Image: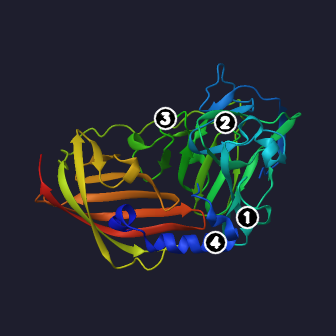
């Protein structure tokens, strides 16, 4: 995914994605900018406490929350109120919510769609008119506040969820568990104002070193944007049982000396694999200035993350792995770079595995070749 286009220009990807979104959302594009409960039932929960921006005083993983903290801007929310028309379900925050998005992974065979609601849109172009208990929604709030869910009677949460190949915005109903336990998982995003005070996306990826992942454990009643490589049924562990995390690997008894990646670099990226809503990018190199700071085996990389700079990474022997997410074109780009230092210490070669997800389309499992030339050393 070309760096210059992603950071400094309006990419072709955006044009294609917006055309797809226009087909699905009709006149919904006149708004500013964007961004089911499946499975067998277990036991009813009355619900106490809250998640997101408003912390629980006494956490209990088996109690569904009755409120959720909303950041100013987008929040990915598991809705646990009664199923009601949207304006009624918004209760105390009605009038301050500009739009709500629902990611429908079952929109049609082999496709996914973003569905849209706004109090400012004509009823004829709204994709849904109710909020459904147990679903995950992207809620755009004009201010930071706490949303009190609509009162409900005893309701149940599922013990499993069906995931489609690609992206799935779902609520997790199990006890604390390793993110890697999800079958066929590639990467996971979490937009959590409590865990990320700036309401930025936190990324988990099997390709990232453990030290630079935003999280490793999944928490009960949180919403996650999950990418899997194949359709799968995700069985949740009991919400009141926390399985032990796997032990960390033993340290290398004789580690090789680390190469110093610190300095100013010029990265050149050439897309080699483009998928989904992204096309017309392959074969054209783009360059981007990048600054790398290294402390022992930890890297800080500036110039690649846009609004989410800096990214972090890790060095092993002569290879650096780093990555993260950045908001782009109304959606989210995830990238993982793997770069190896040349013997002379003046150049890098490697690759970038990337994907983009947003209203109107996805570009999963795309890739680029990457080279870099050192401009200066510290």
> Of label 3 and label 4, which has the lower sequence position?
4
Residue at 58% x, 74% y is 19
Query: SS for tag 4?
Result: helix
Question: 10 Å neighbourhood of mark 4: few (<14), some, or many (≥20)?
Answer: some
Q: Report if the CB atoms under discs 1 and 2 are less than 8 Å apart.
A: no
- Mark 1 sits on what residue? 106
Question: 10 Å neighbourhood of mark 3: few (<14), some, or many (≥20)?
Answer: few
Horizontal arrangement in the rendering, residue 201 relative to residue 75 (left or right):
left
- Mark 3 sits on what residue? 197
Horizontal arrangement in the rendering, residue 362 relative to residue 354 (left or right):
right
Question: 10 Å neighbourhood of mark 1: few (<14), some, or many (≥20)?
Answer: some
Please state, as top left, top right, bottom left or bottom right, where the N terminus lies in the image: bottom left
> Of label 2 and label 3, which has the lower sequence position?
3
Q: Position of residue 63 (x, y in %)?
A: 75, 29
Specify the quadrant of the image occupied by residue 185. bottom right
Q: Nearer the viewer, mark 1 or mark 3?
A: 3
> Of label 4 and label 2, which has the lower sequence position?
4
Up/down of 259 relative to 17, above or below: above
- Mark 2 sits on what residue? 220
Q: Nearer the viewer, mark 4 or mark 2?
A: 4
Closer-to-camera residue (372/3): 3
Question: 10 Å neighbourhood of mark 2: few (<14), some, or many (≥20)?
Answer: many
- Mark 4 sits on what residue? 22
Q: Is residue 227 visible?
A: yes
Query: SS for tag 3?
Result: loop
């Amino acid at each position: 995914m070309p760096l210059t286009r992603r950071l400094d220009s309006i990419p072709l990807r955006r044009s294609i994605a917006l055309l797809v979104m226009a087909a699905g959302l009709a006149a919904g594009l006149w708004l500013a900018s964007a961004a089911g409960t499946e499975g067998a039932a277990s036991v009813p929960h009355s619900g106490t406490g809250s998640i997101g921006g408003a912390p629980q005083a006494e956490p209990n993983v088996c109690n569904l929350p009755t409120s959720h903290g909303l950041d100013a801007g987008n929040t990915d929310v598991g809705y646990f109120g009664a199923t009601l028309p949207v304006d009624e379900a918004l209760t105390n925050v009605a009038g301050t919510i500009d739009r709500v998005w629902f990611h429908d992974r079952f929109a049609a065979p082999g496709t996914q769609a973003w569905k849209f609601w706004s109090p400012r849109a004509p009823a004829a172009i709204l994709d849904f008119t109710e909020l459904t208990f147990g679903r995950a929604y992207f809620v755009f709030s004009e201010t930071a506040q706490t949303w009190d869910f609509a009162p409900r009677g005893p309701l149940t949460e599922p013990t499993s969820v069906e995931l489609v190949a690609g992206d799935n915005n779902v609520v997790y109903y199990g006890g604390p568990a390793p993110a890697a336990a999800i079958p066929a998982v590639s990467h996971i995003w979490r937009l959590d104002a409590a865990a990320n005070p700036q309401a930025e996306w936190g990324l988990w990826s099997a390709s990232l070193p453990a030290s630079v992942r935003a999280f490793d454990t999944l928490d009960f009643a949180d919403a996650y944007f999950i990418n899997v490589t194949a359709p799968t049924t995700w069985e949740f562990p009991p919400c009141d049982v926390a399985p032990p995390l796997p032990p960390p690997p033993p340290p290398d008894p004789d580690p090789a000396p680390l190469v110093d990646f610190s300095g100013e670099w010029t990265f050149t990226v050439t897309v080699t694999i483009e998928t989904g809503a992204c096309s017309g990018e392959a074969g054209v190199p783009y360059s981007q200035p990048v600054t790398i700071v290294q402390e022992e085996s930890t890297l800080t990389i500036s110039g690649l993350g846009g609004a989410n700079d800096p990214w972090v990474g890790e060095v092993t022997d002569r290879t650096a792995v780093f990555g993260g997410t950045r908001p782009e074109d109304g959606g989210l780009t995830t990238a993982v770079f793997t770069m190896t230092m040349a013997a002379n210490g003046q150049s890098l070669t490697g690759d970038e595995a990337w994907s983009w997800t947003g209203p109107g389309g996805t570009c999963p499992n795309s890739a680029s070749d990457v080279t870099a030339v050192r401009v200066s050393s510290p």
